[in-house]
Image (tube, helix red, strand yellow):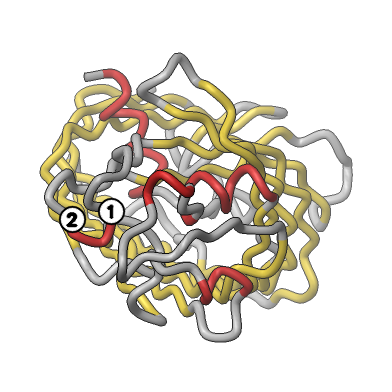
Amino acid sequence: MPRHIALCVTLLLPGSLLADHVPGHAKFEWGLGLAALSHPDYRGSSYTQSALLPLPYIRYRGERLRVEDGIEGRLFKSPDLLLTISGNGSPPSDKDNPERAGMDQLDATMELGPSLEYRVSHDDDSSLWFELPLRYAFNLEKSLESVGRVLHPRLAWRWPAQSKYDWKLRFAAGPLFGDDDYLGYHYNVKPAEVTPTRPAYTARSGYTGLRFDYTYSRRIDRLWFGGFVRFDSIDGADIEDSPLVTRSNNLTAGVGMAWVFDEG
């Protein structure tokens, strides 16, 4: 169960909205809820899955450390420059997916790493940030075994909540780059896995497509509501030649609700 909770959190909260914090929120909040996810087996797969998972709700807002829609450490005095922790996740592949028939099942992975973020511009209501996250991927089924690295430079427009119960919105877009280990884990076809319709393939590090994320959340009294919609395009990516890539774009979505038990 802990690995499912970790995966749910990293999938449902894919971006940071912490930098435009508005005073008036409680320093610490905690709660529990449920999240529903719809996702492809992996980027480039024609097969989708859905899942219902537990969702822990934790918020901490300290002077130097904040845990909200991510983890933020304020190491710089400038409000325009932040160092945060970026997270993402991928669920296990479907055992019945014919694209990977006769191959090992992809295990659930979690991606975590530092993100350097610079505020390009802002006004009273919103801001534009350049984010540079470098995430390290780990296998949740095999004692956090490393499966490579991902670099995801992006521009992010953020609309912070102007009061405790206002909407908080974020839209981000940018390219994805993976190393040999990360792309090989998802897209390699070994000689023993070759079939008449699935030739051998060895992935190399490089560009893996564009990603667009839209994230939203809101508090309504004790109820927290939030979710995301993600669009991935693999057109022109280095992995497009893998026989495991059967479509050029994917849509992933998640929505969650949690009851806030305590705040102070």
User: What kind of residue is marked 1?
Assistant: Arg
Specify the amino acid type for callout 2. Asn
Check contact, mark 1 vs mark 2: CB within 8 A. Answer: yes
Using the image as rendered, state which of residue 234 and residue 5 is in the foreground: 234
Q: Residue at x 83, y 52 (%)?
A: 81
Identify residue for label 1.
100
Q: Which mark is residue 80?
A: none
Using the image as rendered, state which of residue 115 and residue 170 is in the foreground: 115
Estimate the x, y position of residue 231 in percent, counting from the top left.
40, 75
Location of residue 196 by image quarter: bottom left
Percent from the top left, x then y, of residue 71?
A: 58, 35
Q: Is residue 228 left or right of residue 63?
A: left
Which image quadrant is residue 177 in? bottom right
Tell whether 112 sits left or right of 260. right
Inspect this view and state whether residue 258 appears. Answer: yes
In this orientation, which residue lies closer to the viewer: 199 or 204?
A: 199
Image quadrant holding the C terminus, namely top left
* Residue 196 sits above or below residue 143 on the image: below
Find numbered disc 1 in the image and state the secondary structure of the residue it sits on. helix
- Quadrant (top left/top right/bottom left/bottom right) for the N terminus: top left
Determine the secondary structure under disc 2: loop
